[in-house]
Every structure is written in C-alpha cells, then in structure tokens.
Image: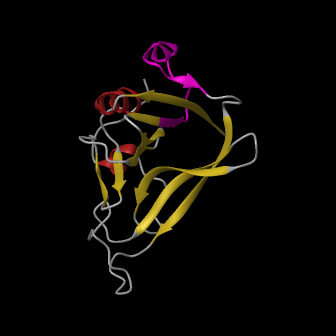
Amino acid sequence: MSVYAYRWQGKPADLPALISRILGDAYFVWTADPAELRFERGPLVHPLEQGACFNPNGEVRWVHLGDEIHALILLDQALDPAMHAEGIESLPGSPWPSENGRVILQSLTDRQVHPSLSQYPHGQPDGDLQARWVKHPSGWRLISPRRFATAGEGRASQEDALGEGEAHPS
C-alpha cells in the first residue's frame, strides 16, 4: 500500500478551494494556532496557522510561513495531472509506502483532561482516529489521518464516517 505525496505553496485565500478540489466536499478539519485548537467537519472556512483536512482518500496539511501557506498532500490515488497546473508538485520518491493503523483518542470525559471541546467531529467524546502510517524514503515516518471512528469500530463506509456522500480526489 502506498500514498502519493505532493507539495503546494500559495496564498491562504486559495487553500479552501484547493482542498475541495482534492478531497471533495466531505472531510474533517483540524486547525490550530497558539490560542486555539478546533476539530470540525468541512468545509474549511478560515485556515489558522496550521492544520489538516482529511477523509478516507487522503489528507492536506498546512502551515503558514510568512505570507504563504505551505501544504503537504498525501493521497491514496495519484492526482489528475491537470492539478499540477495549479502549482502542485509531486515529491521525490512518491509514492511512499504506507500501512493502515489507528490512534486511540483520549477520552474528552476524563477529568484529568481539560479539553476545549466536548466531542470529536464524529459526535462522540472518545473513539479512534483511523490513519495511514507513512514512511518517507529517507526513513522518517508520519501519521496521515483518514477518519474518526467509534471506539472499536471496524471500517465504516465514507457515508457513515462523514454523514454525507462520497468524497474523491480530483
């Protein structure tokens, strides 16, 4: 199993439309800056300092550097070559090897946790984050989120995961 890796650099105002063209209209969003962390369902309205949008087909994560957004795009299928005209570049060694995995989310009802949210975007205070464990050719690894799931839940359909129609890469 592999993921196709790309990079994009551009204006913050261009990021939401780019994400919709890549992931479709059904995806989860996490955004953060030093004062705030938000988890929600898409669409992305205002990108904070850093964040990610993801669904079972892939992830777009970004960070503000100066006046620009620098984004890493990880997808289960190669992008349509026409997307390269929008400034998206394939990264060296792509596709990168990956495997399915999961992260157990910390319960938001735990009294030792003082979260700023009461539930994750799938409507529960706990559960799993299903992800891809991605290995870069140089050896470093990263976790690419794909969907929230109820604790112990097997793979659900895209429709169940997001409560909307299918999403697909362009």
Q: Which of 34 and 38 is in front in this view?
A: 34
Residue 58 rendering spot, x and y as whole percentages: 48, 39
Colour scheme of the rendered structure? secondary structure
Q: Nearer the viewer, residue 65 or 87?
A: 65
Residue 120 rendering spot, x and y as whole percentages: 32, 63
Which of the 4 image quarters holds residue 62?
top left
Q: Measuring 40% from the left and 48% from the top, which residue is drawn there?
A: 50
Which of the 4 image quarters holds residue 4?
top right
Q: Measuring 50% from the left and 35% from the top, which residue is drawn there?
A: 73
Counting every numbered tag in the picture gives: 0
117 lies above or below 44: below
Q: Which of 105 and 154 is in front in this view?
A: 105
Q: Which region is colored magenta? A: 71-90
Does residue 5 appear to the left or right of 20 in the view shown? right
1 lies above or below 17: below
Residue 158 rendering spot, x and y as whole percentages: 39, 44
Does residue 22 appear to the left or right of 144 in the view shown? left
Residue farthest to the front?
A: 66
46 lies above or below 118: above
Residue 166 rendering spot, x and y as whole percentages: 35, 36
Q: Which of the image's four quarters has the N terminus?
A: top right
